[in-house]
Image (cartoon, grey):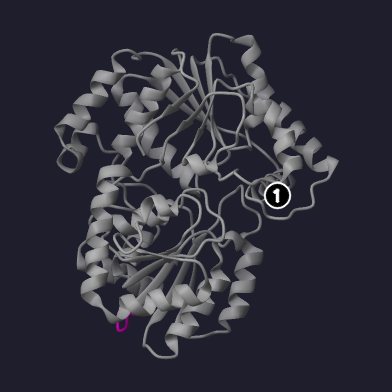
Amino acid sequence: MSSTANRHMPSLAEYEPIVGRSAIEDLRALVTRLAGQRVVMVNSTRAGGGVAEILSRMVPLLNELGLRVRWEVIEGSEPFFAVTKKLHNALHGKPEVITPEVFELFLEVGRRNAARLAIDDEVVFIHDPQPITLVEKRQAHPASRWIWRCHLDVSRPNRAVWSFLEPFILKFDAAVYSSAAFAQQIPMRQMLIAPSIDPLSEKNRELTPEEIAAVLHQLGVPQDRPIVTQVSRFDDLKDPLGVIDAFLRVRRSMKCQLVLAGGSASDDPEAEDVLNRVRERAKGNPDIHLLMLPPDSHLEINALQRASAVIVQKSLKEGFGLTVSEALWKARPVVASAVGGIPLQVKHRYSGLLVHSVEGAASAIKQLLNNADYAKRLGENGREHVRQNFLLTRHLQDYLLMVLTLGSAEDVVYLKG
């Protein structure tokens, strides 16, 4: 039942009933100073993960506004993406063995992509570390503006990895983070822009009860008892084993079921190994549903979230964690770890419950399952919080403002979000 594409790409006018006419008019006014400029977005995959999902929605709307925006994806072998996953983990502070050969493979693939890709646009966005060495190409186009959009929490990185990447980072005009807590103290302009969700995408649009029931039937998830769900890649940093442990504590005293819905991406070679360990921990428990979904399973994720009594995001480390905003947009109560960008989305006891341990997660899940009115109130507050702060139109505005401010003299610019 995987949806291979959204029904259509919405126009800006279709967002007006959700965000208001003034928000759309502000976007059109901002872009008058940038209309016709060529912009390129570069990342490591076209499907799977939050960055690819954001770009797939943002690029068409920026073009509608009058910019000339294209989206490029670097190419790499399986060993290369194994290396970039090591670097990703190390930047999050996870212990990794990093050898000189790791750095050399990273540089070699970077050189091949630099030779393959033509980048002569006025504005260049490089997303995350994988394509970072492309900044060497700016020497041929010194008037262009280069932005490193870091979606990771690099506040406590492996120092060897950071020292390797920092010379490339300093060649950009600006580094952009999702939260002030993610950044490093480095001598360059740094900006803060939270990511966003698209309320009109297949993953977030409204669904009828019949649509939800049909999807759950197809996935083999019954609706006869409360559903607790975590949606994320099968990744150790998302702590799926901890989610199972918390669920088993809840299940001792309450009838409920757990859904772990994960996916894969071409730049994440570790997912299968993590999934195997999760299967071992679940041990065939009929109340635990493990779903390995294709990257385009947007309708399935939407239905699972809307059908859930509680949604969990028990990450050990996190960039921003957009699955939290997706859950809140559906007015679902959320139990999430107080890491990365999650506390920006979940205000404890107002739009969800923040936890710090397996025991805390189990206690919070039980509290919400036992108190439907409280759970409903948290969900409603969460939806409004997302509407005001984490929708795609706000994200577009911040990107336009950022490009405009790159010609000014401020050293640090703080934007909404």
Q: Residue furthest right?
A: 100
Task: Identify which residue is drawn at 66% across, 51% down.
Answer: 93
Q: Could you tell me residue 295's position as x and y percent?
A: 48, 53
Tell me the quarter of the image containing the N terminus. Answer: bottom left
Q: Quadrant of residue 213?
A: bottom left
Q: Nearer the viewer, residue 228 or 370?
A: 370
- Tell me: 206 left or right of 361: left
- Tell me: 279 left or right of 63: right
Q: Could you tell me residue 28's position as x and y percent?
A: 24, 22
Label 1: element kind: helix
Magenta residues, start to end: 222-226
Q: Nearer the viewer, residue 224 or 338?
A: 338
177 in relation to 122, above or below: below
Tell me the quarter of the image containing the C terminus. Answer: top left
Q: Does the magenta portion include 223? A: yes
Q: Amino acid at mark 1?
A: Lys
Task: Identify which residue is drawn at 74% across, 37% down.
Answer: 106
Task: Please give the residue where the numbered disc 1 appears in the rendered image.
Answer: 86
Q: Could you tell me residue 172's position as x and y percent?
A: 59, 22
